[in-house]
Amino acid sequence: MSEKVPELEPEVRKKLESVGAELKPEERSGTFLQVDQDVKFSLKWLEGVELMGIKQAMEKHDWLEDYLWRAVKPEDEYTRDVEEEFNGYFIRALPNVRVEVPVEACLYMREVKKQKVHNIIIAEEGSEINILSGCTSHPGVHSGMHIGVSEFYVKKNAKLTFTMIHSWDTGIDVRPRSAAIVEEGGVFISNYILHSPVKVVQMYPAAYLKKDATAIFSSIVVATENSIVDLGSRAVLEGENSTADILSRTISRGGGVIARGHIVGNASDVRGHLECRGLMLSEEGYIHAIPELEARYPNVDLSHEAAIGKIAEDEIFYLMSRGLSRDEATSAIIRGFMEIEIKGLPEFLKKEIDKAIGMVEKGLSV
Amino acid sequence: MDALRVVNLGVKVGGRKILQNINLYIQQGQTYVLFGPNGSGKSSLLSALIGHPSYNIYDGRIMFKGMDITTLPTDERVRMGMGIAFQNPPKVSGVKLIDILRHCARISGQSEEKIQEYAEMMKMADMLNRNVNSGFSGGEVKRSELLQLLLLNPDFIMLDEPDSGVDLDNISIVGDAIRKLLERDRSAEERQKSGLLITHTGHILKYVDADYGVILYKGRIACIGNPYDILEHIEEYGYEGCVEKCLRRFPNSNQK
Ligand SMILES: Nc1ncnc2c1ncn2[C@@H]1O[C@H](COP(=O)(O)OP(=O)(O)O)[C@@H](O)[C@H]1O
Ligand SMILES: [Mg+2]
């Protein structure tokens, strides 16, 4: 309990804070930091949770071998690259342990050209865990690549909430590769927020859902000038009565966004809904929404809605008629646009997500 | 003291003249009622007064508290003390009523408790976390507009048909709010607030008293007088007949 977080250089600390890192032990149940390929620290303040570097975890648990490359397959150049050499974190909630206070795991790029990460996250039967993962780069690192493989295993009746906040730089190429296997009655909630310029973020995380399982994917991204964000979420409803919601809010401020989504109904009585909303804030840039629904069973309920627009002038005027300046009115509308109602999101995380949305706003007002 | 002085105002929308030669002088403490058939330009006049960018002022000027505000942006007019309740306000997706109320209270320096107090008075306490105007009934829209004004507490208040679509149960709430906003329960000497109130039906005059009535007809001011006399004339002769009588009495009031 007394283990303290080592002192960090102020600029590192500031960058980490911008992706949600909170270094006070009372606000987190554990914290992990990997800089380039090395684990800087891994501290945990609660029983019932395991948190350590993936290398150390593989030494400790023989069985971990079975989890590596089960949800994600090393099928493309990025995953194969990670297969050769990696570091990363291992987080596990033991059976029936419920931890409301989030575990934090940060990945920081400082000197390497390529950061290669493989994470394994397991919520054992009946457990509940919240993870905050901030990924960012050192100020002045203008180019490089981050490849992050994350495999999530949500066991029977467990609940795992994973919130990833990204802040990069104009020349960084980001390729997360992640997938979740959600067992019977399990709940997987994945939230993603990107609030900085980037060269490319390209990812298509998937969740495979067994009987009565639930997945919610939410994402809030901004593509600034010269950034390309190609982002999707996929839910494969394999077990009867499983459900998925994919919600995205994308903003182009001169950059390109491809907002994908794919729900596959593969069993009876499954329900899936996809909601993509886009906001164009600039004459440049684009948003391309590609929602896909696929039914492979007769008794499914799949739907989607997609809408892209700009801020309506009459809405700005209305708020100005209450004394808000044009800028205040604009940011109130953008803020409203980004607000997503996520069912089952713990209070604690709402606060963190609000903070991250605040960062998006800040990024937009420069 | 002057609250509002409108001089020879001409307004175009999309290149079309919709208001011409409007003159209006409202002193502090006075409330004017604006009558007129549908499409005569009543809402457009309020839009021009508050500074809606689509309403292009091609002639004349608007003075508020002795200052020329003809080209001032809307938010600055509001910060000077103008306020408006719209006839058909837009939905603002994602922006909750409470968010707007907080802004209003901040501008007028009123406390958070006042938000609750007025929300209860307007029977809107359950609506605070709803996105503003989205899925609101006609009456809820009117009460929400007035609630926002109560928290903004402006000195010059424009109300566009606050009585339309409000059912009998709620009309007295609306009337009470307007009387409070315009300080109609104070004596004329003590009263600081002024207003310009549009009513199509005149219904609201049973709940709120006013000092002057004006008829706007085909984009021009056709009549000024006692609001109750005007209302009676309209009811008796219709707008057309009423305007005709007025023009005979004041041949210059609608001069080219
Ligand atoms: N934003 C607008 N765009 C186009 N025409 C408008 C607009 N606002 C008002 N008008 C036109 O101006 C005239 C006056 O309308 P309005 O001011 O709404 O009348 P009232 O409120 O008296 O019913 C109408 O012919 C209407 O169609
Ligand atoms: Mg009107």
Image (cartoon, rainbow, N blue to C red):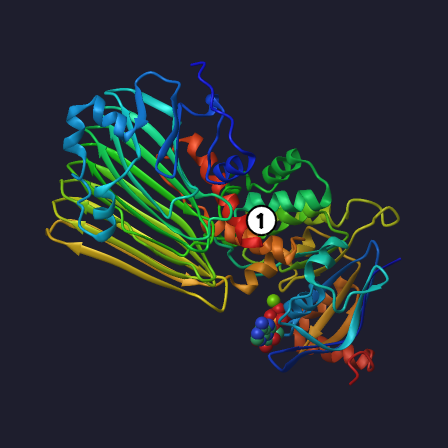
Q: Amino acid at mark 1?
A: Ser
Residue A217 place in picture, x, y as percent:
31, 44
Residue A16 place in picture, x, y as percent:
48, 37
Q: In this picture, is A305 found above or below B106?
A: below
Indicate the secondary structure of the residue bearing disc 1.
helix
Q: Residue at x 63, y 48 (%)?
A: B148
Task: Please state, as top left, top right, bottom left or bottom right, where the C terminus of chain A lies in the image.
Answer: bottom right
Q: Residues within 10 Å of mark 1 (few under 14, many from 20)?
A: many
- Ligand 1 falls in quadrant: bottom right
The residue closer to the viewer here, B78 or A244, is A244
Q: Quarter of the image holding residue A239?
A: top left
Q: Quarter of the image holding residue B35?
A: bottom right
Q: Residue at x 47, y 19 (%)?
A: A4
Q: Is residue B162 visible?
A: no
The residue closer to the viewer here, B188 or A218, is A218
Queried on whether the Cβ of the residue with tag 1 lies below 8 angstroms from ligand 2, the answer reads no
Q: In this picture, is B15 found above or below B26?
A: below
Please tell me how many numbered marks the rendered image carries.
1
Q: Residue at x 51, y 56 (%)?
A: B91
Check disc 1 and report the residue beneath it.
Answer: B144
Task: Please state, as top left, top right, bottom left or bottom right, where the N terminus of chain A lies in the image.
Answer: top left
Residue B125 place in picture, x, y as percent:
55, 38
Residue B237 place in picture, x, y as percent:
67, 74
Q: Is residue B246 visible?
A: yes
The residue closer to the viewer here, A202 or B145, is A202
The answer to whether B96 appears left or right of B193 in the picture is left
Q: Residue at x 84, y 59 (%)?
A: B65
* Name of the residue lying farthest toward the bottom: B256
* Name of the residue lying farthest toward the top: A2
Q: In this picture, is A237 found above or below A99?
A: below
